[in-house]
Amino acid sequence: MNRLLAPFLAVLLIGTAPSTFAAKPAVDVRTLEARERETLDGVVAAALVGALSEQLGGRAVKIRLGQIDVRVSSLRDRVVSGQGELQIDGAREWLGFRFSTLYDSLYESAGYPELSIGVAGPGGRQVPNDSGLIREAEERVIAQLAKEFGYQKVWLQLDRIATVESGHRYLRIDASGTADFGRDGAAPARIEALYDREQKVWLRVAYVLESTMPQVPPAG
């Protein structure tokens, strides 16, 4: 080896060797938990915006979340539930909602949430039922049931009906009873409907049959 290069190479090797074996800084457990929670909040919020818009007939929504509870159900799954408020199509009024969904921490994804829209908030109060709106909601549900179950004849008997006013614009109708399919039997049914009094349109009419998920057609 060239005698002139030897001292230079020795200095170079001595200067670079320690960095090869430098220990990586430890990551604080709290930091990891904070990062996971931040990701979870963002993913769940995005899933809620998409689902709320879909269930409200594709209308634009803006949300603000309140209390959120996260429960570990397995090594990778988290059950996320909570409440919040939303604005529909830029309306000034905020409307309450509740939700529950499953979050996969491995794939950082959230399932389609279960939603209850128009829940009574600080400005909510129960008001007398409007017979015309109740009849319209029934007709919509009967048509949806008939379509889902092969256009067979369906009778709907509602035993409990409650209407809640949210602010001055929205009415939420909660009803429960029985969906009768004649010779094919009957099933307990529950209805959630949301009506916009200013625009005079149904924003959402959803029903749940025993052991089924809500069926939500486009509003209109």
Image: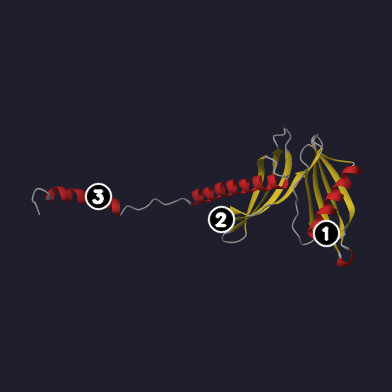
Q: Which of marks 1 and 2 is in front?
A: 1
Q: What element carries label 2?
A: loop
Mark 2, other Cα within 10 Å: few <14 / some 14–19 / many ≥20: some
Residue type at the position of mark 1: Tyr
Residue type at the position of mark 2: Ser
Q: Is mark 1 on a helix, strand or loop?
A: loop
- Label 2 or label 3, whichever comes before in sequence order: 3
Query: Circle 3 is placed at which residue position?
Result: 16
Report if the CB atoms under discs 1 and 3 are less than 8 Å apart.
no
Residue 151: assigned label: 1
Q: Is residue 83 visible?
A: no
Query: Which residue occupies 23% across, 48% down?
Result: 15
Query: Circle 2 is placed at which residue position?
Result: 105
Q: Which of marks 1 and 3 is in front?
A: 1
Quadrant housing the C terminus = top right
Mark 3, other Cα within 10 Å: few <14 / some 14–19 / many ≥20: few
Q: Nearer the viewer, residue 66 or 148?
A: 148
Q: Name the side, left or right, on which 26 lies relative to 125.
A: left
